[in-house]
Image (cartoon, helix red, strand yellow):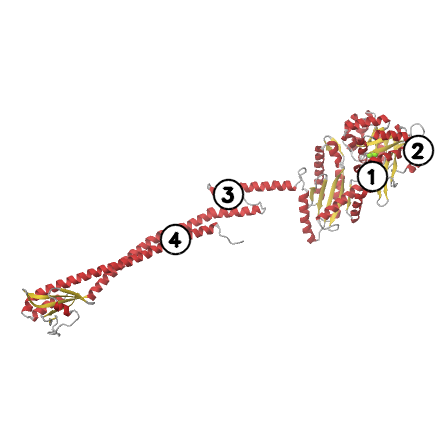
Amino acid sequence: MKPRFGLQARFLVAITLMLGVVVLVLVLLMQRQQQMRQETESISREAVHRLVDTYLRDHAASLARRVAERLANPMYYRDLDAIGTVVRDNSRDSLVDYIRVYDLEGRLVHDGSVEIADFGKRMDDPLAAQAIAADGLHVQVSPTVVDASTPVMVGSERVGGVRVGLDLQVAGRYEQRNLSELGALMDDLAKRHLGWLALPLGLLALVSILAAWHVQRTLVRPIRWLAASARRIESGDYTVERLHSARTDEMGDLVRTFGRMSEAVARHDREVRRMAYTDALTGLTNRLAFRESLDHRLMLLRGAGRQLALLFADIDDFKRVNDTLGHEAGDEALLQFANRIREAVDKYGGDDALLARFGGDEFVILIQEGDVRAAATRLAEVLVAELRRPLDIQDRQVFLGTSIGITLFPEDASSASALMKNGDIAMYQAKVAGKNGHRFYSRAMDHAVERRVHMEQELRGAWERGELSVVYQPVCRTSDGRVVGAEALLRWQHPMLGMIAPSVFIDVAEQSGLIEGIGPRVLRTACTEAMRWAGMGDGNDRLFVSVNVSPRQLRKGDLPDIVAECLRETGLPASSLHLELTETAVISDELQAAAMLARLHSTGVKVWLDDFGTGFSGLSHLRRVPVDGVKIDRSFVADLQRDPDDLALTTAIIAMAHSLGITVVAEGVEKEAQYNLLCERGCDLVQGYWLSHPISATEFAHLLARRGR
Ligand code: C2E
Ligand code: MG
Ligand code: MG
């Protein structure tokens, strides 16, 4: 991190500057003091010097005068002894350097010494001339001496003169001593001053240090903590521990507000994340989060050489629920589905499993524990079994199923997007293969999907090319086991793809509208075929043919006309033609359906409700929709022996239908036991592999001939 000039540094700099200024002022003050002291010293020296000078002059003058007075008589009498005594008496003063007595011509008379070496010699020192010449008191100064001379008078007669010399060196020493005493005093004073200055300075330094420490503790530290926390929050880390501050000042307010704010931000972030990463309806992980997690896991797995399986589960025919029961019911169904999937994944998916809803009716599961292929197979089987159990929605039983596509990493693909595409393809193949099952992805499937895109184009001319045919599945009466009719079922034998399941191409035909062309052809073919069965019957009751009608044909509105025309053209009695409508088609627009049914009835044909029980019409619905028969869906029949609910429902349907005078047909009878159960419950007609698979018209004719019906 770039070094920066932080708050604390600034504060320290400010304090240092402040201390610096204080020290500077102090230094200036001391300098000033020093200067003052020097000035004071020089003034004092001058004053002392002047004082000493004046004193010396006065002293020399008065001493000279006093000595001159005392010398008047001895000089008059030239009494050398007396002169000597006076001179010596006065020479005792330590200041006195010399006392010289001289005559009118300036010759030395006495200098206080015993031998008077220079007696009678004219004084010739530098000050002598002026002293001799002066006719009154005369004071002169040389560098070493203050010389005062005065004439010695007897009355008004001058008898000689006397010179008193005061030693300037002694005076100088005295002066010096005085000055150094003064200096010492001033030093002392300066020291005391310094002491007084150092005390506040020390206090100031102490206070500054305390202030810096205080600022660090109460301002810098919390601000740094706030800044660090803010940075962490900014980088998306919301695990900042909350700083509880008991402080009542602004910083306390700030810390508390910050704490609250960071919590609010974290909450908001959690909320946004939750919203962005979870599916609002089921609370499961959504596509976005799943994609992120998948990318992440792939990255980890790539290095580790481990496997991963993706299961794409799509609810079969889920659109029906929304179309017939409304979106609320659709949501409810999705929730129940999601819960079942979650339970299954929790149980069989391993700890690392991840379940997501991809929107709509698509769920994706990721597993990565153990042998993923085996685990994926087991989970897929459980899911298919779990999800085909009926759902309870708005007091109705809803039957749905699931198709699951499975793709493996790294076998099938190594990137997330390729894996997701593969899963989708495999899921689609599971649907193509008849729904309610699972398929593993294989590379061949890519091809198949491409072909699916072309399926619509292929289907367009299929009838003309003779690829489409109609097969017939016998319908038997339970009372005597005789074949009473057959259901016409469309088949598509594609030259390249082979046999294509109706559940796949009927969808394509329905969605593309091709069914509007194909449907009437099937009807005509079936009617023509059924006419041929006439001779094979015993004459009393003709064999009927039942033809599936798609919702689209029903909606179009011209169905009754087509039916009437078909009957007229083929000559088939209306009573021998049954139309199978799906519940979905009937319920999505009950009013229109009722009108359409009335018109169909007017042509004399019978109308059956196909796949009864998987739609959501419920038993009460039968009262409002005038149908002649219901075909109990094969999913109920399949579980008759195992599931008491299915048996109860089937029994109820039969009883209810009978009370309304409606025929009951059971589809998908694959076992004798099922047949027996249905017979027992009074089911009128049955249809299923146990009796016969759908067979060609010729085979059906043979069968009739063989059985004698
Ligand atoms: P669906 O009308 O319910 O037809 C009965 C389906 O059950 C047929 O499937 C039949 O082969 C199958 N099936 C019969 N007995 C058994 C059994 O014992 N066990 C099992 N598991 N299945 C049995 P298919 O032929 O695959 O037809 C599927 C659906 O396609 C039909 O269901 C029908 O809804 C639709 N479909 C078929 N042909 C036509 C057609 O010409 N027009 C229209 N609009 N839809 C058609
Ligand atoms: Mg049918
Ligand atoms: Mg059916």
Amino acid type assigned to the residue bearing label 4 in the image: Val
| Residue at the spot of label 3 | 255
As helix, strand or loop, the secondary structure at mark 1 comes to: helix
As helix, strand or loop, the secondary structure at mark 2 comes to: helix
| Mark before the other along the chain sequence, 3 or 4 | 4
| Residue at the spot of label 4 | 21
| Residue at the spot of label 1 | 502
Does the Cβ of the disc 1 residue fall within 8 Å of ligand 1?
yes
| Mark before the other along the chain sequence, 2 or 1 | 1
Q: Is residue 259 left or right of residue 364?
A: left
Amino acid type assigned to the residue bearing label 1 in the image: Pro
| Residue at the spot of label 2 | 532
Q: Count the numbered circles shown.
A: 4
At label 3, counting other C-alpha atoms closer than 10 Å, the crowd grade (few under 14, some 14-19, many 20 or more) is many
Marks 4/2: CA–CA distance = 124 Å
At label 2, counting other C-alpha atoms closer than 10 Å, the crowd grade (few under 14, some 14-19, many 20 or more) is some
Mark toward the viewer: 3 or 4:
4
Does the Cβ of the disc 4 residue fall within 8 Å of ligand 1?
no
Quadrant position of residue 649 = top right
Mark toward the viewer: 4 or 1:
4
- Whether residue 192 is visible here, answered yes or no, is yes
Q: Considering only vertical position in the picture, is 182 above or below 661?
A: below
Q: Residue at x 49, y 48 (%)?
A: 221
